[in-house]
Image (cartoon, rainbow, N blue to C red):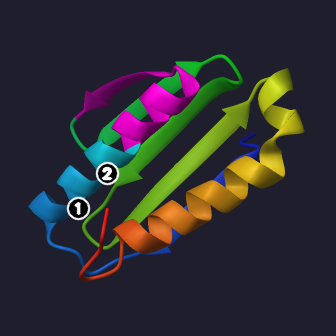
Amino acid sequence: MADISVRRDHAVERDVLRGRLEELVGGLVQKYGLKARWTGDTCSLSGAGVKEAVLRMGGADVSLDITLGLMGKMLKPTIQKEIDKKLDRILAPTADT
């Protein structure tokens, strides 16, 4: 079961959304040392503090499910807050990423 599960509806054009999500993933990779792999509209992430994370891009919604490691669980409130803030910005019709 995911420690953090976020779902957001959106009305962002598909190509624009994909670019924004790729930037988000790139930032997570750099900041937290995660490994990421895109398969279609799904990105799998893992690394220290994150056992597994799955980002799914749909036509009308985006979901992110994260299973945290021990170190990540200690930072859960901070991680949750950061994810919420970034997704809100990314999914705004005229996002500043």
What element does badge 1 sit on?
helix
Seen in the picture, residue 4 relative to 92 is either above or below; the reply is above
Q: Residue at x 26, y 30 (%)?
A: 39
Residue 38 at x, y = what percent?
Answer: 28, 30
Q: Which residue is mark 2?
A: 21
Question: Which quadrant is home to the C terminus?
Answer: bottom left
Q: Residue at x 70, y 55 (%)?
A: 80
Residue 60 at x, y = what percent?
Answer: 31, 73
Residue 89 position by quadrant: bottom left
Quote the CA–CA distance across marks 2 and 1. Answer: 6 Å
Rate crowding at label 1 as few (under 14), some (14 to 19) or many (20 or more) other CA atoms within 10 Å: many
68 drawn magenta: no
**Nearer to us in this view, 33 or 41:** 33
Amino acid beneath label 2: Leu
Q: Residue at x 44, y 28 (%)?
A: 29
Tag of residue 81: none
Seen in the picture, residue 68 relative to 13 is either above or below; the reply is above
Left of 64 or right of it: where is 81? right
Tag of residue 17: 1
Question: Which quadrant is home to the N terminus?
Answer: top right
Which residues make up the magenta segment? Answer: 25-39
Q: Residue at x 86, y 23 (%)?
A: 70
Amino acid beneath label 1: Leu
Residue 65 at x, y = what percent?
Answer: 59, 46
Rate crowding at label 2 as few (under 14), some (14 to 19) or many (20 or more) other CA atoms within 10 Å: many
Tell me if label 2 and label 1 are in contact, CB under 8 Å. Answer: yes
